[in-house]
Image: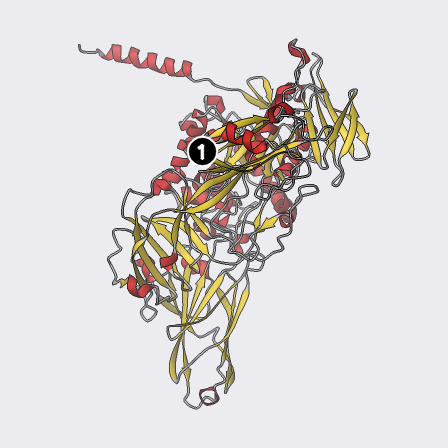
Amino acid sequence: MEITPIAKCVFLACCLLFLEATTVKCSVTYDRRAIVIDGQRRILLSGSIHYPRSTPEMWEDLILKAKEGGLDVIDTYVFWNVHEPTPGNYNFEGRYDLVRFIKTAQKAGLYVHLRIGPYICAEWNFGGFPVWLKYVPGISFRTDNEPFKRAMKGFTEKIVDLMKSEKLYASQGGPIILSQIENEYGPQAKSLGAAGHQYATWAANMAVSLGTGVPWVMCKELDAPDPVINTCNGFYCDTFSPNQPYKPTMWTEAWSGWFTEFGGPVHERPVQDLAFAVAKFVQKGGSFVNYYMYHGGTNFGRSAGGPFISTSYDYDAPLDEYGLLRQPKYGHLRELHRAIKLCEKALVSTDPAVTSLGSLQEAHVYSTKSGGCAAFLANYDTKYIARVYFNHMHYNLPAWSISILPDCKNAVFNTAKVGVQTSQMEMLPTSIQIFSWEAYTEDLSSLEDNSFSTFGLLEQLNVTKDASDYLWYSTNVDISSSESFLHDGKLPTLVVQSTGHALHVFVNGQLSGSASGTRENRRFTFKGKVNLRVGSNKLSLLSVAVGLPNVGEHYETWNTGILGPVALLGLDQGKLDLAWAKWTYQIGLKGEALNLISPNSISSVDWMQSSVVALNQQPLTWHKAYFDAPDGDEPLAFDMSSMGKGQLWVNGQNLGRYWTAYAVGNCNKCSYPGTYRPPKCIEGCGKPTQRWYHLPRSWLKPENNLLVLFEELGGDPTRITLVKRSVTSVCADVSEYHPNIKNWQLESYGEPEVFHKPKVHLRCSPGKQISSIKFASFGTPLGTCGSFTQGPCHAPSSYAILDKMCIGKERCSVAISNSNFGEDPCPNVLKRLSVEAICA
């Protein structure tokens, strides 16, 4: 049947009306208590997940785990440098598919906080700015500067228009309920004075003028003008108040851990302290909390900033780098979120009444007109447990903890009492062999077409434009046959001062030495003996960037590379200054120019066979091999402990920089009470900062995957192994009177008061079962997960009960009660059940 044009128009109009009707638009506003969605004040719990730090194939799983963990909102920065790598040319594909990421959150039923910035910091290369921005004429970053404001406005409009075109703002029926402009600008605004204030005001007004229909925020910016909300970032934000009494109290970055830098230890933040910080913020009227990070992920490619930020951006987040649950952090926070949500109605209805319960103890009580009540009982003492009297009842509060009472009677959660399981993760070898190793060493004798010569030393970034981490500085040094060192053996000393970040010195094609800076001190000096011969000697300095700076006032003006002095000491003439010699520059490596990482270009050079590779560990060497994908779905990584420093690729995808730099620090035992700072709880001292490098399974094909790496120093690639990350054992340690969320408002339901016994819950990874009980004791066991021992009180049936309830199961639960373990092993003593189970 032929459809008439009029019928077509009617049909299309009906479709549009249907789509309009099925799009649920939200009103998002705020008042002094909270963000208001469709007229309802909300306590919102959020988590940062950065889309470029994982793969699209991971996104849904990460977001669903965040939802299961009790979150309402997914928070992400927008990464300008990956979206606009060259002016006017945009990329929203693959890991950079921002729309797909937001729609994945929407599909899961979560809101989104879109932090456009476009300055993001984030330990990301150049703070998220594209390097080409540095070379816009007359530009000065993040101040009242017209070229910068013009570029910033252009990108912000591009992102807002993209979101509008996909109907992703809540005002259009989408999930985006908040947006952020700028990022942690307060300290720079203060330093810049009037220019900083004018820029911040301009940025806020520019953002609001874009008409998104949702509120805008500025974090760490006390002068955020109305209607923009100023918010807090930090380890603690309980002392923060917004700059106007009609704005809500929001915490845009509750730091769940800390970043890692090559050469430094790994930082951990105890979940007891993180939960304490969040509860303390909420008890004082905070209504929005975002964990930075909830999943940290991986700095793939050359995306890590710093400089010296490691490829792993794990951040000790509730979801680890690979997307697995970090227990007990994930589970304990989930219980916290459940407890807070039980208090939501009271929290958003009124201000708290604060009552002293002792010298370092207090209660925050929220009482509603309708009779609702919620209370937070806090003990700020860092050493001692406190027994407090509240509402005609006694409560025991561990040191540095807060108990949550959604009904002002029953404590359903205490921040210091961890009742969820602890999962022990291990990197286990796979059965996969990496085969057909071959090597190609960079040719230092020839120059590429992109080389050029000039007198004097040039700043590295101005030459490379960040097209490569590597820049060659080469010159010639003539040595007379009469030089004394040729006869007495006292070799001359080469001194090279660099502004960052690492340096390899070659004389006549031979490595003479290396040096590097640190994140705190980018500048460093190489000083070493060099073996020169009669006649012309080629001095080649390979300067290496390890991520561009991401924070600091006008960091776009900071230098990288060799700017001198460069001098030879110990010659007959004394000091030979080479700073103004004729230098030849070459951007990048020959292997980069030949695109050796690509499966299509791999045969463009003569590779050395594997029989020689292991014996001939040369610096500046490309290595390649092949491997098949292992079975299963466990996350994968390469163990790179046999290598030195470089980068690695699989099937053309850059896994990131690797560096077997050993961690310096004082790894003392960590205790949760007291104010947290990154040096407080560290591990890995004396070991490589990062040993394992994440390989996303979605980058693999079933067979013949190409592994390519570039090694700067020399190492044994034949000892690289492919490993899988897996939960090998699970533990629990719960007392018989552990707070239980099922025990709240018992009387209000009209049911008899039956105390719900706490339970130990154990769960292996999907596809694994509990194969054995390594430890079990109901009584007074000692120690922690991995080192439990029996105490003076122990129920003899402990092992038998756990065997019966758990062996052969993926998950099990055991009630903590005397009846479950026969008779009471020690009457009138507070008992606990400690268990360690093996997953296989």
Quadrant location of residue 480? bottom left
433 and 734: which one is in front?
734
| Residue 662, horizontal then vertical, whole percent | 53, 58
Quadrant location of residue 194? top right
| Residue 246, horizontal then vertical, whole percent | 67, 26
Q: Quadrant of the N terminus?
A: top left
Residue 389 located left or right of residue 541: right
| Residue 530, horizontal then vertical, whole percent | 46, 77
Residue 724 located left or right of residue 357: left
Quadrant location of residue 353? top right
Residue 1 located left or right of residue 256: left
- The residue positioned farthest toward the left in the image shown: 1
| Residue 498, horizontal then vertical, whole percent | 51, 66
Q: Is residue 216 visible?
A: no
469 and 670: which one is in front?
670
Q: Can residue 125 be seen in this view?
A: yes
Q: What colour-coding does the image apply?
A: secondary structure
Kind of residue indicated by mark 1: Gln
Q: Which residue carries the number 1 mark?
A: 769
